[in-house]
Image (cartoon, rainbow, N blue to C red):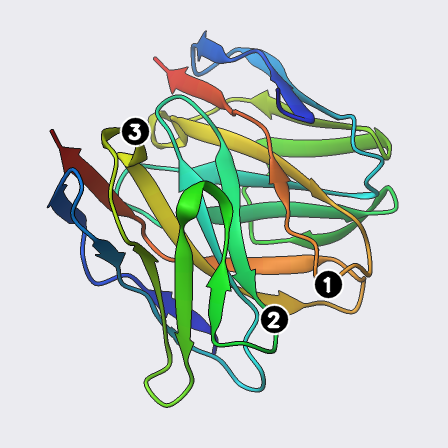
Amino acid sequence: ETGVTQTPRHLVMGMTNKKSLKCEQHLGHNAMYWYKQSAKKPLELMFVYSLEERVENNSVPSRFSPECPNSSHLFLHLHTLQPEDSALYLCASSQVWQPNQPQHFGDGTRLSIL
Amino acid sequence: AQSVAQPEDQVNVAEGNPLTVKCTYSVSGNPYLFWYVQYPNRGLQFLLKYITGDNLVKGSYGFEAEFNKSQTSFHLKKPSALVSDSALYFCAVRRTSTSGTYKYIFGTGTRLKVLA
C-alpha cells in the first residue's frame, strides 16, 4: 500500500481537452515533486514544491500548470497537450531537510494524448 | 555537472545465479546514491542508499550495493536472483537545493530479467 496516491491511473485525452492529475500523500511530508517518465529516457523532474511553495520549475511548457494547495495535495493541470506529452507522470514526496530519507513515489498516471 | 550512467539497457540472469546491475556516477563533492526498483504499472520503490560509512550497503529484498569511490561506481547486487526480481532498476544521485528539497538525477534504467 503506497503512501502516495495518484488519480486517475490512466487518462486518455484529446489535444484540446483540459484535465487535472491529482496526487495525495499520507506520509506527513512537506515537499512534493512531479516527474515525467517516457520510454527510453531518464526520469525528468518537472516541478518541486517545498512547504507549498514552488521552488523549481525545470523549463516545463506552460501547458502544464502545477498547484499545491497544501502539503498533502499536489495537482498537475493539463491543457492543449501535444502527442509527445504522452508518458507516465509520477508524483513523489519527501521531508524537507531530511537528507537521509528517500523520496516516496506514487504509482503514476499513464497519460495518452490522441 | 552531476550525472549517472547505467551502461546496460537489459541484464539477463538465470534464477539462483548472482546478479549485478551496474551504475557509475559523476558528482562534485560527496555522493549521495540511491537505487530504486519499478515493477510494471507501479511507481519507483526505494531499495537502498549510500550516504556515508560502509562501502557495502544492504537494502530491501536481499539486495545490496557496493560503493567504490575510486571507480565512481555503485553497482547493485544480489547473491541469488529470483524470477520476482524481474523489473526496471534505477540508480540515482541526489543533490541538495537551498529549499531543503532534493533533486535526484536518475539513470536511464536497467531492465533485469530473471529466467526460470
- The CA distance from mark 3 to mark 1 is 30 Å
At mark 3, the secondary structure is: helix
- Residue position for label 3: B84
| Nearer-the-camera pick, B40 or A85 | B40
| Residue at 70% from the left image edge and 61% from the top image edge | A100
At mark 1, the secondary structure is: loop
Q: Which of labels 2 and 1 is toward the front?
A: 2
- Residue position for label 1: A99
At mark 2, the secondary structure is: loop
Q: Residues within 10 Å of mark 2 (few under 14, many from 20)?
A: some
Q: Is residue B52 above or below residue A80?
A: below
- Label 1 near label 2: C-beta < 8 Å? yes
- Label 1 near label 3: C-beta < 8 Å? no
Q: Residues within 10 Å of mark 1 (few under 14, many from 20)?
A: some
From the viewer's perspective, is B94 left or right of B83?
right
Q: Which of labels 2 and 3 is toward the front?
A: 3
Residue B70 percent coordinates (x, y): 37, 90
- Residue B42 - label: none
- Residue position for label 2: B51
Residue A66 percent coordinates (x, y): 70, 34
